[in-house]
Image (tube, rainbow, N blue to C red):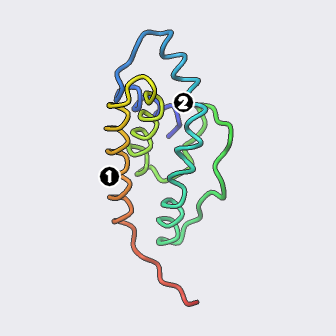
Amino acid sequence: MTYREIYKAALSLIGEGGREEEVMLEEKAEELIPMVVYSLLPLDRLKKKSVGGASISAPQTFIELDDYWPLEESFMPCAAHYLASYMIGADDPDLANLLYVRAEAMRRIISDGIPYVIERI
């Protein structure tokens, strides 16, 4: 899975504009995706720790849309909602807020599904 798939899902959530608008949104997405990855990284670490997997140490600062998504695939719908919210924020604050609330709800559902890991201190 690539960042482009998340970007395309985000576009479908906000409704695609003309080609000129899509080029602008694509550039914006490349700047915003690292922030989305960073916000989901703690959950990814918890989820992978609960099953004995290894997570990335830190998200890339600069990405290209054809780079691979570094987190669990289950985070992709949540990431698409966050990205759509961030991309449309200034132009349509009501839609951005709705998308953000949905992303937060998905984040809570993912969090609730992660088994707790108890370690000795």
Disc marking residue 40? none
Give the residue type that dot 1 points to. Ala
Give the residue type that dot 2 points to. Ala
In this view, the residue in front, 93 or 74, is: 93
In this view, the residue in front, 49 or 94, is: 94
Q: Residue at 63% across / 49% down in the picture?
A: 59
Q: SS for tag 1? A: helix
Report the residue marked by disc 2.
29
Instruction: Give the image location of residue 107, x and y in percent.
Output: 38, 54
Instruction: Give the image location of residue 56, x and y in percent.
Output: 62, 57
Query: Could you classify mark 1 by the number of other residues whose Cα lies within 10 Å: few (under 14), some (14-19), or many (20 or more)?
Result: few
Which comes sooner in the sequence, label 1 or label 2? Answer: 2
Position of residue 27 in the picture relative to residue 100 (left or right)? right
In this view, the residue in front, 76 or 13, is: 13
Q: CA distance from mark 1 to mark 2?
A: 22 Å
Report the residue marked by disc 1.
105
Instruction: Give the image location of residue 86, x and y in percent.
Output: 47, 34
Asked where in the image residue 93 lies, by quadrant, the reply is: top left
Asked where in the image residue 32 lies, by quadrant, the reply is: top right
The quadrant of the picture occupied by the C terminus is: bottom right
In this view, the residue in front, 18 or 94, is: 94
Q: SS for tag 2? A: helix
> Quick check: 96 above or below 37?
above
Q: Residue at 43% across / 41% down in the picture?
A: 82
